Image (cartoon, helix red, strand yellow):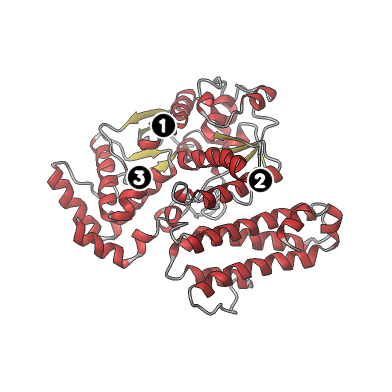
Amino acid sequence: MSDKHKQVAYYPGCALEGTGHAYNRSTKEVGKALGLDLVELKNWNCCGAMEVKNIDPKLQTYLSARNLSIADAMGFDTVMAPCNGCYHNLKKAEYDLAKDPPSREVTDRLSRKAGHATYEAGKVTTIHALDWIKESVGEQGLKARVKNSLKGLKVANYYGCMYTRPRHIFPEKDKGPGSESTSKPHFMDDLLAAAGAENVEYPLKTACCGGAHTLSDSDTSTKLVLNLLTTAEACGADVIATECPTCHTGLEMHQVRAEKVFGRKTSVKILYFTQLLGMALGLSARRVGVQENFSDSTGLLRARGLG
Amino acid sequence: MRLDGMLAASDAALSAAAAPLAEELLQLGETILETWLAAHGEIATDRKVETFRLLALHRQGARGDASFNACRETCRELVYHYNLVRLEPGHAEVARRLRLGAMVARHLMLFIGGKLEVAGLGDFCCASRPLRQLDASMQTNETV
């Protein structure tokens, strides 16, 4: 535990203002409940996501660099991004600007053209919401604040794919005891266990959900998601905990589609890990945006004395 | 035994044939990756990585196509479940371990099957194409 992340710059990204609104709401509420302070970046822009990146990767680097430079100008050395896609892109920009001179040159040129300060590599570090809570409060700190234990709730933790890949852009991971692992991530498991949840062994926690082709090849995505859902059920999970708005939306939407298209109904519920933590900290289900989820978990949560 | 048969089989049936079923799952994984390599005109390696051909095949598949790493942990999970069953074939949870192994194999099959139809599957998660491909950076120099 350290005070380093007690106050951080907050980069919600586009998804958390749209389909991932419940993640935005629950992240802020959990922060408040834990005494952590989020200061949203002023005038932030899209991180470049996959559309820009696939057309022009250096433009994506510039877009993410601009967000990092805003954090720097606001006096922060740490940006917290809860979305796996944003987290990934900001980390990739950090890496590119430190290691790839052509990226550096393009970013500098575009910054001058746009009329704002260029970003100096190494001045700002991006962290995920998992790092933010794990490193600022820790399991013991969290345990001490739990008002409504998640005891009895069986959770499959789904980290998705961007949180761990490619591993070289996350130099802080795979450092051994205490650090996050790219092959077997465990920070979400640790935090939810501290909140009382029973984590099930989930072998597909970093497997691909086909998110990139959710619109262009829906059947492939639906089949991949259906396997994630049925495997979670086979592991005995009541809930799949997510940490990314894209994964979350994909799991929820393809759960419905799997039933309609393939006639395969699954009953596992999908909740953001921040929603689960929020309820464990005594916040109401409404306060952490459970009603905004597509997957109706009201019955399950009531049965477990949550919400 | 087919994957769906394995998933539907009784605990007793799975426990009775634990070791051969674990072998079958591992071989299925190898066949899935061999299919990918064959589709790309490559001869599947007989080498082993960490004593497993499956991991060597994965490494071969990922060479030049880093988005293939999106199934790296899936292959490793398959090996993990194989090890669990082979090391403790008489364990009380062996049937469950085999079923989970079958689900992991199914995911690998779905991913590779999807990737054979849509090459971009896995690109988003690895985000590796723009990061590693030279042609992408050359294209950038022209467009920015």
B46 in relation to B91, above or below:
below
| Left or right: A18 in relation to B21 | left
The picture places residue A231, in percent across and down from the top left corner, at: 66, 47
Residue type at mark 1: give it.
Answer: Lys
Residue A209 at least partly seen: no
Residue A70 at least partly seen: yes
**Label at residue A153:** none
Which is in the foreground here, disc 3 or disc 2? 2
**Label at residue A125:** 3
Which is in the foreground here, disc 1 or disc 3? 3
Q: Which residue is mark 1?
A: A6
The picture places residue A89, in percent across and down from the top left corner, at: 36, 48
User: Which chain is mark 3 on?
Assistant: A
Residue type at mark 3: give it.
Answer: Thr
Q: Going 30% across and 66% down the picture, which residue do you hit?
A: B135
Q: Which residue is mark 2?
A: A230
A68 in relation to B50, above or below:
above
The picture places residue A92, in percent across and down from the top left corner, at: 35, 52
* Foreground pick, A224 / A149: A224
Which is in the foreground here, disc 1 or disc 2? 2
The quarter of the picture where residue A297 lies is top right
Q: Earlier in the sequence, mark 1 or mark 2?
A: 1
Cα distance in 3D space between marks 1 and 3: 15 Å
- Callout 3 and callout 2 share a chain: yes
